[in-house]
Structure formats: C-alpha cells, structure tokens
Amino acid sequence: MRDYTRAVEFGDILSRRRSVRAYERGDVPRQVLERITNAAVVRAPSAGFSQGLRLVVVTDGETRRQIAAAAAEEELVRQGRPRWKADAPVHVVVLVAESDYHARYQEADKLRITGGRELEWPAPYWYVDAGAAMMLLMLAAIDEGLAAAVFGVTDVPKLRDAIGAPEDLHFVAVVTVGYPAQGSPAVRGARMFDERRKPRAEVVHWERWGEAQGANGGGARARPARSGRAHRR
C-alpha cells in the first residue's frame, strides 16, 4: 500500500503534467488503478456533495478499440494523425449524473437558502466537478509513475454501446492512462506551447476585469515553474 502520509512536493508532480500519447505495452496493476480513481472519487470537490461523478475503467482491448472508433481514430489516422487512443492500455471514461445535482439541490437544506426553489445554476457544476476530478485523476496517475492524456468522442451513442452506459449519464471525456513509452517525446514540444501561450495579462486580472497588474507586474507572460516544465500542455 502506498504511504500517502509522506511529504509530497506538489511542484514535482505538477512539473511532469503533460499530455502523453505513447505508452509502454503491458497492464497497469489493478491496485494502482484503484488508487488513482479513488483520488478522483474521494478528493475531488462536489457541489453540495452531490456526488454525480461516474467512472468506467476499461482495460479490455476490444472495448478500447470501440471507444477509439467512437472518437473516429481511423479517420484521423487517414488524415495523417498518429494512432494512439486504442493502444493506450487503460481508458477511464468520465461520466456525470446531472440528476444527482438537481436532486441534491431540491433537498430541504438547499431550498431554505434559495427560497424554496432549486437555484438557477450559473454554471453546470456537474461538468465543473467532473473536470476537477479528471485533473486529480491525472495528477494521481503521475504520482504513480504513469502518464495520461484526454480525448473526446464524436459518436456518443457508439461510446454508450461500448461501455453499456445509461442514457441519463452525460459523457465528459476519456482519460488514457499508462506507463510512458521510454524515449518517446511529448506529442509536441513544450517550447512551441510557450510561444503560443497567451500573455498572462490577458488571462489573469486583479481585483476587477481589465486590471492586469499583479504583485510582480502582470503584463508579462506566465513564468515557468522552478523546473521549467510545470506549464506544459
């Protein structure tokens, strides 16, 4: 059992966060997958503790091929894109039950706050929570020596058929997980993303919209973390 009481330098994990789409062949141990999915399920925020997150962990090769087909992988390969989705040893399909949120916010303690009516959601928090869970899942994978990436699908019904997902669950994304292939670079160099990164002043505002001056002068592009890698895609 991994000792999670030890001191962990978050920056070390964050510096390795990038999208990796080339994996070693071979299985990821079940207990490792249990730990990284547990990080998403237990540690991710959940609005009102609605707990709408649903994960389907897929290691079966044929099912992974069907999920990749739902993402039109063969068509992308014909366009010159690399084949990697079906080859990833693990797919974690991220789904969310919107109904769990509506049910939770129609309970008495929530209705007292909103005057007897369910709140008008300013943002669909079922997706917000799912995104937070995905990031925790990926960081937990990195902590286990794994790598991860994310892809979407263009044919949701085909995905549902592949994994047997109920109609009332919203599809969010597929997270691929595996041990990174030795010597394989990230799909694109971090330097190119640095050159394309929007100026910090365009992204981060201070106190009010349009106020970009931060404590260290907010007009410059975001600075790299200590390792120079924490900001990679």
Image: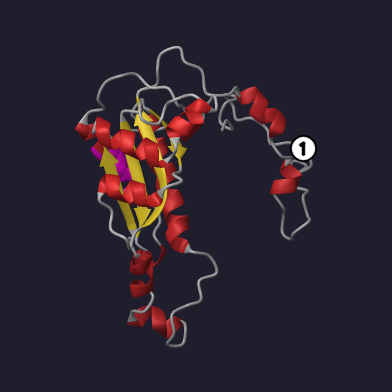
Measured as percent of width and height from the top left, residue 103 is found at 33, 74
Amino acid carrying label 1: it is Ala
Instruction: Say which residue appears at 72% left-offset and 42% top-offset.
Output: 200
Q: Quadrant of the C terminus?
A: top right
In the picture, the quarter occupied by the N terminus is top left
Q: Is residue 160 left or right of residue 120?
A: left
Residue under the point 44% across and 25% down: 83
Q: Nearer the viewer, residue 95 or 75?
A: 75
Q: Could one spot residue 48 in this view of the protein?
A: yes
From the viewer's perspective, is residue 42 above or below residue 168? above
Residue 4 in sight in this render: no
Q: Is residue 29 located in the magenta-colored stretch of the structure?
A: no
Residue depicted at 59% across the width and 26% down the height: 226
Q: Which residue is mark 1?
A: 220
Would you place residue 207 above or below residue 82 in this image?
below
Q: Residues within 10 Å of mark 1 (few under 14, many from 20)?
A: some
- Residue extent of the magenta highlight: 34-41
Q: Main secondary structure of the magenta part?
A: helix
Q: In front: 78, or 5?
A: 78
Q: Secondary structure beneath disc 1?
A: loop
Image location of residue 52, percent across then percent down: 34, 60
Residue 73 found in image quarter: top left
